[in-house]
Amino acid sequence: MALFRLDGRRALVTGGSKGIGRAAAQALAELGASVTLAARGEEALREAAHQIPGSHWVVADVSTPEGVRAALEAAGEVDILVSNAGGPPPSLPSEVTEEGWQRGFETTFLSTVRLAQGALPGMRARGWGRIIAVTSLTVGRPALNLPVSNALRAAVTNHLRTLALEVAADGVTCNTVAPGYTATDRLKALHADPAQAAALATRIPARRFGEPREVGAAVAFLATPEAGYITGQELLVDGGWSI
C-alpha cells in the first residue's frame, strides 16, 4: 500500500486562492485528494484552480455564516478541512477598535468554529476526518503589531485542542500548523523595506524565509492516514525561529 496518499478523500481549503492556502491545496491534490478552493476573489480562484488539476472553486466569505454554508455545500462530503483565514491588519494593541476586534473574531475565529461544526457530523459518521487550521508562530510568541492575530489565532489553537479531546475516538484529528516568516504577499506587505526584510531573515536560524509550499506540505502530512495518531497538536514551520 502506498504511503501518504489521499485518493478518494475530499478536501476544502479556505483562503485557497493564494499563498499558504493555495500551497496546501496543491499539496493535497498531489496526494490524490479532490480539492475545493474557497476564497472571496473569483479571478484568483479561477487562476489557482487552473494550476491545480482536478480542483474546484467557490466564491465564499467564510467570515459569515452564509459564506461557510456556501463553501461546505460546494465541497460536498468534506473529509479534510483546512481553515486558513487571512491575517487581521497590523496595529498596536491599544489602537484596535471594537469593530476591529469583532471583524477579527468573525474572520479568524468564528470561521474555523463554523466550518468545523459543519464538516464534523459527516466526518464522525464516516469514522475519518482531518480538521487543520493554519495559525501563526505568534500564537505563543506575540508580535507587538499583530494583537488581533495573536489573540484570536491562540483561541483557534485552543478550540481545536479541546475539540480533539471530544472527537479523537471517532477517527477525527484536529491540529494546527503555525508558520513562521513565510514568503507570502502578507509578509511582503508587513516588511516592505528590503533592508528590514533582509535583517529579519538573518535572525532566523535557517537564514531565510519559508516557502508557502513548505507550510503546505506540513498541512498535507497532517491530513494523511499516517498522521492519524497526531491530534491536538501545533506544528511549527518556522525555520527554527521558536528555539
Image: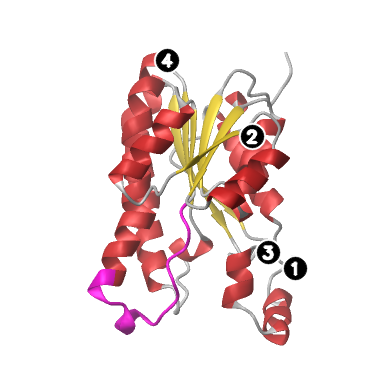
Please state if 65 lies on the left or on the right of 211 as rendered.
left
Residue type at tag 2: Leu
Q: Residue 165 appears at what percent x and percent y?
A: 34, 34
Kindly identify which residue carries mark 4.
126
Q: Residue 36 appears at what percent x and percent y?
A: 54, 34
Kindly identify which residue carries mark 2.
28
For the point 31% across and 70% down, the residue is 100
Q: Earlier in the sequence, mark 2 or mark 3?
A: 2
Q: Is residue 43 above or below residue 167?
A: below
Q: Is residue 49 above or below residue 64?
A: above
Q: Earlier in the sequence, mark 4 or mark 1?
A: 4
Kindly identify which residue carries mark 1.
208
Q: Residues within 10 Å of mark 2 (few under 14, many from 20)?
A: many
Seen from this angle, which residue lies furthest front? Answer: 43
Find the distance from the CA under tag 2 to the CA under tag 1. 25 Å
Please state if 189 lies on the left or on the right of 120 as rendered.
right
The secondary element bearing badge 2 is classed as: helix
In this view of the protein, which residue sits in the foreground, 178 or 82?
82
Find the distance from the CA under tag 2 to the CA under tag 3. 20 Å
The magenta segment: 85-99
